[in-house]
Amino acid sequence: MTSTVPTRLVYHSRIAEGVDAAELAAIVEASRNRNRTAGITGGLVLYRGVFMQALEGDSVAIGDLFLRLLDDPRHEAVTLVQLAPVAERTLPEVWLSLLDDEDAVEELLARHDLRPPFDPRALDADAMTRLVSDACLARAYLLD
Ligand SMILES: Cc1cc2nc3c(=O)[nH]c(=O)nc-3n(C[C@H](O)[C@H](O)[C@H](O)COP(=O)(O)O)c2cc1C
């Protein structure tokens, strides 16, 4: 990798109609492989149809990925929360963790003092990054 400006991408979106557990597993499997190749780390949380994702990597790789994400019909209403250089990468070193178990996400939300009804628009970039970061640790897929 030539460019080395660490960049963070944080967004939320809504899962598209018809995306089932098998399709979600396929997204995560393919994404892990791509992220490993691109040196991108981060996590994905799915709660009641809302995706929250935080990723870190080289600025070019992250920019390219964001453009592909915007075009991906498997989710909609992609809302950018942060796309910015960071002094250092802070997300756990996982290629892409997924936390989608409703009870586990509710425990996580409670730990972050987020009470129902949950609205991702209430979270700023740092709060969403912390939440996804914590979710990565709840489901650790270590780098190999
Ligand atoms: C919620 C969600 C999260 C995704 N996360 C990633 C990811 O972390 N890395 C990745 O390469 N692709 C991710 N994708 C898939 C990309 O949108 C895209 O399909 C993939 O990078 C392949 O792009 P291409 O079909 O244009 O080659 C995600 C898709 C969705 C719906």
Image: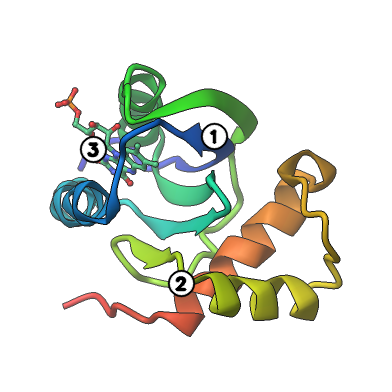
Tell me the crowding category of disc 2: few under 14, some 14 to 19, or many 20 or more residues within 10 angstroms, Cα based. Answer: many
First of labels 1, 2 by sequence position: 1
Residue 23 image point, x, y percent = 21, 46
> For the point 33% across and 30% down, which residue is it?
74
* Amino acid residing under circle 3: Thr
93 sits left or right of 84 in the view: left
30 sits left or right of 59 in the view: left
Q: Is residue 100 above or below residue 111?
A: above
Residue 20 image point, x, y percent = 29, 48
- How far apart are the two marked residues, 1 and 3, measured between alpha carbons? 31 Å
- Name the mark on residue 45: none
Can you tell which of label 2 and label 3 is closer to the viewer? 2
Q: Is residue 22 above or below residue 137?
A: above
Can you tell which of label 1 and label 2 is closer to the viewer? 1
> For the point 16% across and 50% down, which residue is it?
26
Taking depth in this image into account, of 61 and 111 the one nearest to the observer is 111
Taking depth in this image into account, of 53 and 101 the one nearest to the observer is 101
- How far apart are the two marked residues, 2 and 3, measured between alpha carbons? 22 Å
- Are the two marked residues, 1 and 2, in contact with CB atoms closer than 8 angstroms? no
- Are the two marked residues, 2 and 3, in contact with CB atoms closer than 8 angstroms? no
Quadrant showing the C terminus? bottom left
- Name the mark on residue 2: 3
Q: Secondary structure at mark 3?
A: loop
* Amino acid residing under circle 1: Ser
Q: Secondary structure at mark 1?
A: strand
Q: Quadrant of ligand 1?
A: top left
Residue under label 1? 13
First of labels 2, 3 by sequence position: 3
Q: How many marks?
A: 3
47 sits left or right of 118 in the view: left
Residue under label 2? 92
